[in-house]
Amino acid sequence: MQAAAKSNLKHVSLELGGKSPLIIFDDADVDKAADLALLGILANKGEICVASSRVFVQEGIYDQVEKKLVEKAKAWIVGDPFDPKSQQGPQ
């Protein structure tokens, strides 16, 4: 971006730095956003090319989202893939 600005203000398109970002804004339903963020990375053990591998949260709700994600991640059940209660089998 700096190089483009210094050399005659070329039009550039900047990307967020990797694959599959998930962006959560201040007006989001925190509980639903946390559910979707967790599902976005843990569904199919994260073996999806569009797994939301990075989460960007607007500053106003960052602490709420972080707390909710930790709570939901701790409740995620990893176990026998044949057990209906398991949400994830071995990696």
Image (tube, helix red, strand yellow):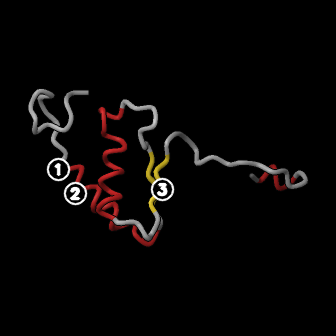
The residue under label 1 is which amino acid type?
Ala
Amino acid at dot 2: Glu
84 or 68, which is in the foreground? 84
Q: Which residue is mark 3?
A: 23
Q: Residues within 10 Å of mark 3 (few under 14, many from 20)?
A: some
| Residue 34 percent coordinates (x, y) | 32, 56
Q: Which residue is mark 1?
A: 75
Q: Nearer the viewer, mark 1 or mark 3?
A: 3
Report the residue at 17% width, 37% height from top: 78
When the figure is inspected, residue 46 is found, relative to residue 10, above or below; the finding is above
In which quarter of the view is residue 86 placed? Answer: top left
The nearer-to-camera label among 2 and 3 is 3
Q: Quadrant of residue 81?
A: top left
On residue 71, the disc is 2
Q: CA distance from mark 2 to mark 1?
A: 7 Å
Q: Nearer the viewer, residue 34 or 74?
A: 34
Mark 1: few/some/many CA within 10 Å (<14, 14-19, 20+): few
Q: Amino acid at mark 3?
A: Ile
Query: Quadrant location of the C terminus?
Result: top left
Between 71 and 11, the one lying in front of the other is: 11
Earlier in the chain: of badge 2 and badge 3, it is: 3
Circle 1 SS class: helix
Q: Is residue 42 left or right of residue 19?
A: left
- Under circle 2, the secondary element is helix
Q: Nearer the viewer, residue 54 or 20?
A: 20
Q: Are marks 2 and 1 in contact (CB under 8 Å)?
A: yes
> Residue 84: image x %, image y %?
10, 35
Q: Is residue 62 left or right of residue 73?
A: right
Q: Where is residue 24? Give x, y as percent.
A: 44, 60
